[in-house]
Amino acid sequence: MAVDCIAILKLATDDIQSADGEARVRNVIGRAYYAAYHRANLFHNALPDQGAAPLDKVGLHRALSFSLENPTVSDAALRKKSKQIGYMCRDLHSKRVDADYDIDRDITIKTAEQAVEQTKRLFDLTA
């Protein structure tokens, strides 16, 4: 059975209500990021022009945010929207990396709430 980015965001939103420890808070951030990543990827793939590619070799996630941040579409409103989505993806990716890999760092419920709200804003931009 397939899943979509809306279901992933719903999971993050539901989980934040019952996040009873830092591990669950970190998981919320990860789910929010992946919901945003998949939604941004759908937006990116629907663009008439895919945007600039990074000059350096980077992973898929960084490549997506870079291309969105450096759009090559001619429509000014679409360029602005692409840049906003790219910046959001980069910020959410940073939060996700901190949550997944920096286990000595305190990750708060506030950070998780910010990640969920930012993802909701990204969804609004791509609606």
Image (cartoon, helix red, strand yellow):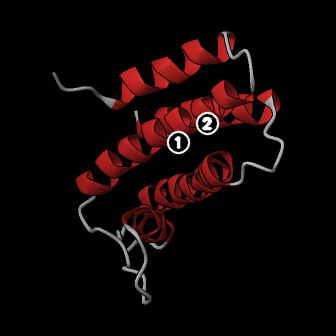
Q: Which mark is residue 67?
A: none
Going by the numbered disc 1, the residue's amino acid type is Tyr
Going by the numbered disc 2, the residue's amino acid type is Ile
* In this rendering, position of residue 85 left or right of residue 60: right
Disc 2: which residue: 29
Do labels 1 and 2 touch, CB within 8 Å? yes
Residue 61: % across, % down: 43, 61
Comparing 90 with 47, the one in front is: 90
Q: Which mark is residue 33?
A: 1
The residue under the point 26% across, 68% down is 49
The quadrant of the image that shows the N terminus is: top left
Residue 42: % across, % down: 30, 46
The residue under the point 78% across, 39% down is 107
Residue 85: % across, % down: 52, 52
Residue 68: % across, % down: 44, 64
Marker count (numbered): 2
How packed mark 1 is, by other alpha carbons closer than 10 Å (few <14, some 14-19, many 20 or more), is: many
* In this rendering, position of residue 17 left or right of residue 84: right
Residue 87 vertical position relative to residue 49 in the rendered view, above or below: above
The residue under the point 42% across, 89% down is 55
